[in-house]
Image (cartoon, rainbow, N blue to C red):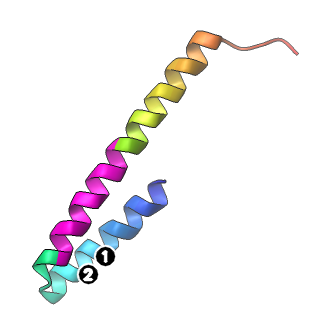
Amino acid sequence: MLSWVVTFLIIALIAGVLGFGGIAGASVKITKAIFFIAVILFLISAVVGLVRGRSNV
């Protein structure tokens, strides 16, 4: 999921340098949304992992 963030960030940077403000703005918004979703999913995963604990196999 973080690879999508990097991809859209690169698209936004290239579009910004070339003067495509609309595309750059949209890419930045998408990048922010995906990044925050990834952070939230990571935090949920970490909390669930702590609550369940480690099983002895």
Q: Is residue 26 magenta?
A: yes
Q: Which three-letter amino acid code belongs to the residue tagged 2? A: Ile
Work out which quarter of the rendered image holds the C terminus and state it: top right
Based on the displayed image, in which of its 4 quarters is residue 20 positioned?
A: bottom left
Question: Dot 1: what SS?
Answer: helix
Callout 2 crowding tier (Cα within 10 Å): few <14, some 14–19, many ≥20: some
* Residue contact between numbered discs 2 and 1, judged by CB atoms under 8 Å: yes
- Where 44 falls versus 26 (above or below)? above
- Where 41 falls versus 16 (above or below)? above
Q: Which mark is residue 14?
A: 2
Q: Main secondary structure of the magenta part?
A: helix
Q: Which three-letter amino acid code belongs to the residue tagged 1? A: Ile
Q: Is residue 55 left or right of residue 28?
A: right
Q: Is residue 37 magenta?
A: no
Which percent across, then down, holds residue 8? Answer: 34, 68
Which percent across, then down, holds residue 27? Answer: 25, 68
- Where 38 falls versus 56 (above or below)? below
Range drawn in magenta: 23-36
In the image as oriented, which residue stretches furthest toward the right?
Answer: 57
Based on the displayed image, in which of its 4 quarters is residue 26 positioned?
A: bottom left
C-alpha gap between disc 2 and disc 1: 5 Å
Q: Is residue 49 left or right of residue 10?
A: right
- Where 23 falls versus 56 (above or below)? below
Residue hosting label 1: 11
Based on the displayed image, in which of its 4 quarters is residue 29 positioned?
A: bottom left
Which percent across, then down, holds residue 13? Answer: 24, 75
Question: Dot 2: what SS?
Answer: helix
Q: Is residue 54 left or right of residue 17?
A: right
Q: Which residue is at 16% across, 68% downward?
A: 25
